Every structure is written in structure tokens, then in C-alpha cells.
Image (cartoon, grey):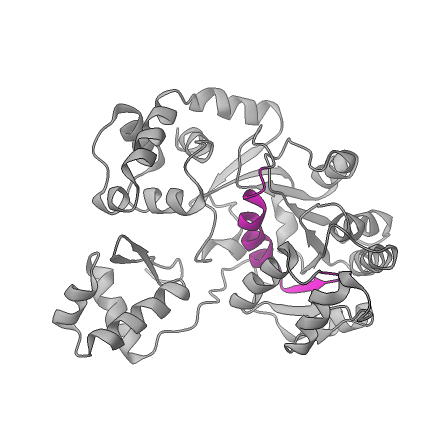
Amino acid sequence: MSRAALAALAGLPSIGPRRLQLLLAHHEPADALDRLARGATLDPMFVRATPDDLLQRLREQAAIASPDRLLAECENNGIAVFGRSDPSYPAQLSVDPQAPEVLFVRGDISAVAARRVGVIGTRHATASGRATASELGEALADVGVAVVSGLARGIDAAAHRGVRSATGSGRPIAVVGSGPDVHYPKPNAELWEWVAREGLLLSEWPPGTPPDGWRFPQRNRILAALCEVLVVVESRQRGGSLITARAAAERSVEVMAVPGSPRCRASEGTNQLLVDGCAPVTSVDDVLTMLGLDHRRQSELPFDPRPMPNALQSRVLAVCELHPCSLDMMLEVVDASLCEIALAAARLERDGWLVEAAGWFEATGSRLRP
């Protein structure tokens, strides 16, 4: 029942990952779906953070949802459904501040237990960039490293084609921005099925979900959180690759970049990453050396990447762990100025210790603590 309700909630067209996270912070999946469908009372934190018209749309969508049918569709198509409380949910994601509440998975979830390197880049890649991505994918897989990408055209697809050419045990892992059964782009359909068969393909969206543009920036946080090292092969000055690189850096994942000609538009973003201090990739050895420096995410046990709160932040966090608080409520019990408290709360939210909704702050909790 929980899996069916999770699948149905994730499939509500108006929900979105952040709103789903807020809803499930206060209700079990089946209870949340039932309350939405019946128009029953929901937790005040969720209601305050949800505009009235959006809440009404969610209620209408929940009323016509068919969780049992959706779960049966998943099972019939070889798609597993994992919630955050499921023992098979990837430990690497479990403590992420923006962890997806549900994953729709094709393939072998144990693929995430291997060493993992992300290889990503622009869809509008040069021939040289595609060749570099393919060579990196093949060389990493030859030494047993799993290669993570978004299965987009260009660099992502080239990296996984390199894995397919390898003779080693490294497997492909793909995080996609549509339902796990919706091939996008269509020319990658055969590669998509190969990844699902030989490695792992996962999405936070249920079967049939179209590849809407806004879903791709959302999925990039999952891709970043699964990596131990992220390599950007080619990227324009603005684009999804740099969003993923930023998400990785926020999670203390090492970001590396392949240098390119300053005359090449496809190298503008990667060259800027190098200027900003990212390590260069001139061969696969550079990546393997970097991978050997950081073992925090190697274990299947959760690694919490969040910076530890300082003294003032700890006092603010302790108050919010008791019950949701506004800044005024914090001011009554924390010995600091309103400005200091507001700054501490903002940094706790940025680092994933608090979540804010309509001016109320609530502790996110941690699976590393009782």
C-alpha cells in the first residue's frame, strides 16, 4: 500500500519533488494520498507552503489517481519502486537534503555499491568531446568503476557507449528526466535499454512521465549525489552540466573538467570550471587518482555531506527540532540578535539541516542520528 501510494503521489502532475518531500515529512504516503483525495485536513506546514489553487489541483488529481493500477504497471514493466524507508534505497542518497522520496528503478540497484564517477557534458558536443567521453567511460569501466550520466545526447550518451565497449566489470548508471520507460532522446532508445539491462536506470518519476524541460535540472541533484567524482567533458557557458557541477560541489563531491580550446564554444564552461579551481582531466589516471583520495562515499553505509553547524546554528537547530519555529519564536529562546538568528537559519537551510515553508523552519532530521 505504501509503495502504491508513493508511486501515485509522485505521479501527481502538480506535486514536484520539494512539495512531495514536505508532504511526506508530516504524513505517511497512504494517509497523504487519502487526505488529498477526500479533501481532508493536512498538516499546517504543508498547507501554509501551498497556494490555495495549487492545493485544489492536487486534491483533484489525487481523487482520480489509481495507485494499484500504477503499481501493477510498474511491476509488469520490470520497474521497482523504492521509498526512502526501503532497505534497498541507495544509502548514498538517504541523507541528501534533497533526496527523492521515491525512486522508480530498472536494473540492478546494487550497481551503486561500486566506485562511481559521473561523466557529463553538453548535448551539443564536438566530435573530440564525444570521443573523450567515450574513452573515459571505457577506461573507467575497464577498472571496475561505474559510470554515472544522464543519458542525454552528446557527452552523456558517449560516456555510456564507452562503457559498453569495455571489457571490465564497471557498469552504467543513468539518472533520467522522464519516466523510466520513456526514451529521451528517442535516438538513445537502444542505449537506454542496454543500461537498464546491464546496469541501473533510475528516475523519480513514474512510468509514462514525459520529458518536460523543468524535470532535467531537478534530476541533476540526484546524479550529483550518486557520484564520488564528477567529470565535465564539455560544457557551454550556461547549461545543465554546470547545474550538476554546482550541485556536486555543494555536496563536497570533487568536480573535474577536461580542458578545451578557448576558441571552442563547447569548452567555455569547462574552462571556467578550471579557472574556478576544479582539477583538470588530461587522462583517466587523473580521475582514478582523485577517486583514490576520497573514500567517504565508498561504503554502502550512509555518508552525511552536510557541514556541521557552528555553536549558534546548533542552538537554532535544537529549537527547531522540538517543533516548527518562526524567527520570532527562535528569538525568544536563543541568545542572539534577530539578524544573527536569521543568518544562522538561512545557512542551516542551505546546508540541509532545516526546511523553510511560509516563514516556518523545521528540522529535516538525519538518518545518522536516532
* Magenta stretch holds residue 216: yes
Q: Position of residue 117 (x, y in %)?
A: 69, 60
Q: Position of residue 341 (x, y in %)?
A: 25, 73
118 vs 9, left or right, is right
| Quadrant (top left/top right/bottom left/bottom right) for the N terminus | top left
Question: Residue at left 56%, top 31%?
Answer: 209
57 vs 360, left or right, is right
* Magenta stretch holds residue 281: no
Q: Is residue 302 above or below residue 200?
A: below
Q: Quadrant of residue 276?
A: bottom right
The residue lying toward the viewer, choosing from 242 and 82, is 242
Question: Residue at left 72%, top 37%?
Answer: 185
Question: Residue at left 37%, top 70%?
Answer: 347
Report if residue 47 is visible in the image: yes
The residue lying toward the viewer, choosing from 337 and 288, is 337
Q: Quadrant of residue 364?
A: bottom left
Q: Position of residue 354 (x, y in %)?
A: 33, 61
54 vs 128, left or right, is left
The residue lying toward the viewer, choosing from 245 and 352, is 245
Q: How many marks?
A: 0
Q: Quadrant of residue 136?
A: bottom right
Report if residue 290 is visible in the image: no
Q: Position of residue 42 (x, y in %)?
A: 24, 37
| Quadrant (top left/top right/bottom left/bottom right) for the C terminus | bottom left
Question: Residue at left 53%, top 49%?
Answer: 218
Q: Which contiguous range is marked in magenta?
A: 212-235
23 vs 101, left or right, is left
